[in-house]
Image (tube, rainbow, N blue to C red):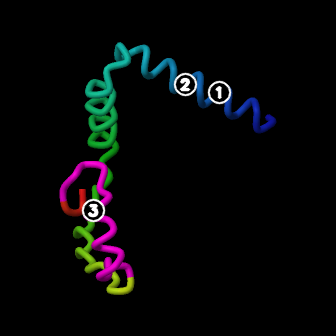
């Protein structure tokens, strides 16, 4: 099988799956969840990533901040 044949096959399967669920994304997600549950595999949920503080070097400085405030397309400070 060439790569083009594989791609065509995957796209055809995707199209058939979507069509069988009326192209309703919620119905497709529900069906995939059922398949996952039926597989008996354990779903592992990782802890959320911690929020990172912005790099200080990327913060607006006096001149840049003043320029942004006076030339904001929305008219207010910072947008």
Q: Magenta span has 66?
A: yes
**Which mark's residue is nearer the viewer, 1 or 3?**
3
- Label number found at residue 70: 3
Pointer 1: what residue? 9
Tell me if mark 3 has few (under 14), some (14-19) or many (20+) residues whose alpha carbon lies within 10 angstroms of its own. few
Label 1 to label 3, Cα distance in Å?
A: 55 Å
Residue farthest toward the right in the current orientation of the protein: 2
Element at badge 3? helix
Residue farthest toward the front in the current orientation of the protein: 70
Do the residues under discs 2 and 1 have CB atoms within 8 angstroms? yes
Quarter of the image for the C terminus: give it.
Answer: bottom left
Which segment did they paint magenta?
58-76
Side (left or right) of 16 relative to 42: right
Where is residue 78, by image quadrant? bottom left
Tell me if mark 1 has few (under 14), some (14-19) or many (20+) residues whose alpha carbon lies within 10 angstroms of its own. few
* Residue closest to the eye, 14 or 69: 69
- Place of residue 38 in the rendered image (x, y in percent of width and height, measured from the top left): 29, 39
Pointer 2: what residue? 13
- Identity of the residue drawn at 75% across and 30% down: 5
* Residue closest to the eye, 54 or 30: 54
Residue farthest toward the left in the current orientation of the protein: 76
- Identity of the residue drawn at 32% across and 42% down: 36
Relative vertical location of residue 35 with respect to residue 67 in this rendering, above or below: above
Where is residue 26, by image quadrant? top left
Residue farthest toward the bottom in the current orientation of the protein: 56
Quarter of the image for the N terminus: give it.
Answer: top right
Element at badge 1? helix
Relative vertical location of residue 2 with respect to residue 26 in this rendering, above or below: below
Do the residues under discs 1 and 3 have CB atoms within 8 angstroms? no
Element at badge 2? helix
């Amino acid at each position: 099988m060439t790569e083009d044949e594989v791609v065509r096959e995957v796209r055809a399967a995707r199209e058939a799956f979507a069509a069988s669920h009326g192209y309703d994304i919620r119905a497709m997600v529900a069906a995939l969840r059922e398949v996952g549950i039926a597989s008996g595999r354990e779903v592992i949920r990782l802890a959320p990533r911690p929020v990172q503080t912005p790099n200080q070097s990327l913060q607006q400085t006096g001149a840049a901040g003043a320029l942004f405030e006076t030339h904001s397309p929305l008219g207010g400070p910072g947008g």
